[in-house]
Amino acid sequence: MPRGGLCDGHRIRELSTEVSSIMSTRLKNKVALVTGGASGIGEAICLRFAEEGAHVAVADLNPDAADRVVKKILEQEGEALGIKVNVCHQQEVQQMVKKALERLGRIDILVNSAGVSRILPFLETTEEIWDETLAVNLKGTFLCCQAVIPHLLKQGKGKIINLSSQSGKRGTSWYAAYCASKAGVIGLTQSLAMEFAPHRINFNAICPGIVFTSMWDKQLAQYGRKRGLTPEQAREYLISRIPLGRPAQPEEVANLALFLASDESDYMTGQALNLTGGQEMH
Ligand SMILES: NC(=O)c1ccc[n+]([C@@H]2O[C@H](COP(=O)([O-])OP(=O)(O)OC[C@H]3O[C@@H](n4cnc5c(N)ncnc54)[C@H](O)[C@@H]3O)[C@@H](O)[C@H]2O)c1
């Protein structure tokens, strides 16, 4: 080593390789099941978890899109499995868990990211829209938790991460069904955190603000209708209200999910964490 303790370039490269190999093992030997894993935030979570050594079950209503995510993970020499599921149906959820256990051996982490949303006036919210929103976002989360928890109990530890939203913290006009479903997810998360704390199963919710995934493809026009704006103007307007001045990237949500899935967050449970660029502070 040169005088003054400074390393040469070669040693620095060696060290950074060592550091990145340590850094990329935060979920080594863990198996994660991610619903809604084929798109947007769920996809970013699957890829980030796989980078950190997890074996990932990518569960989604859209099996082709799930297989595309699986392929990306396999290309990076990770391990992954695609599972078709509709999280609203108990039997399908049970089959999903069975398949993940058969093929990947265990489940340590569940991420409930499957979700739907619609922006429209309350008086136009049909019973069908209400039921679908509550069924995917809230009942789906309930069913997946109920199917996975018995396995976490047997293992004596586990992490469950539910995607709520800033809309779960604060009601917004034209968003009644979605806000109700996401507030429900926070209530469910807190209740399960209390019930299963003695069993070392941690439950936390993530409350993102604006993340321009495919969920916003139709929503920009819907939000534009609410404000009398074009979809592009609606996008600019939404961004202008974010204190940090930009939307979140799906990868930023994945980084928070990674922390919640890893041992680093063992002392955290029952939390609903904002990731909103400063828009929501409670
Ligand atoms: N994008 C945002 O701005 C934002 C903000 C706050 C919260 N969220 C929440 O984050 C989660 C992920 O959203 P996203 O932006 O990645 O959306 P997305 O539309 O990109 O992905 C949602 C995924 O869920 C799947 N899905 C829908 N219904 C399903 C069902 N019944 N069974 C199984 N899979 C189903 C879809 O096929 C899709 O792959 C959702 O719960 C959403 O409410 C998103």
Image (cartoon, grey):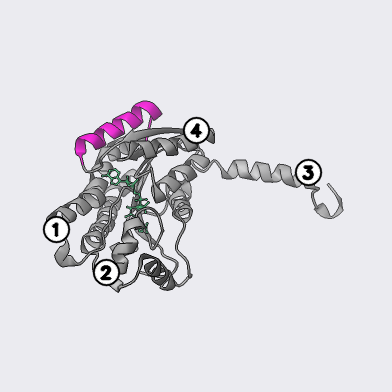
Label 1 to label 2: alpha-carbon separation? 18 Å
The answer to which quarter of the image holds residue 210 is: bottom left
Q: Is mark 1 within 8 Å of ligand 1?
A: no
Q: Nearer the viewer, residue 54 or 251?
A: 251
Residue, far top: 102
Task: Residue 214: give x, y in percent of width and height.
Answer: 37, 53
- The answer to whether marks 1 and 4 mark residues whose Cβ atoms lie closer than 8 Å is no
Residue that label 1 marks: 126
Q: Which residue is mark 3?
A: 10
Element under label 2?
Answer: loop
Which label number is shown at residue 74? 4
Marks 3/4: CA–CA distance: 30 Å
Outermost residue on the left side: it is 127
Q: Pointer 4: residues within 10 angstroms few (<14), some, or many (20+)?
A: some
Q: Which residues are magenta?
A: 89-108
- 1 or 2: tag closer to the N-terminus: 1
Helix, strand or loop: magenta stretch: helix
Name which residue lies at 25% across and 40% down. Answer: 86
Q: Which residue is mark 2?
A: 172
Q: Are marks 3 and 2 in contact (CB under 8 Å)?
A: no
Residue at image coords 29%, 62%: 168
SS class of the residue under badge 3? Answer: helix
**First along the sequence among labels 2 and 4:** 4
The image shows residue 62 at horizontal and vertical percentages of 32, 40
Q: Residue at 40% across / 54% down in the picture?
A: 213
Amino acid type, callout 1: Thr
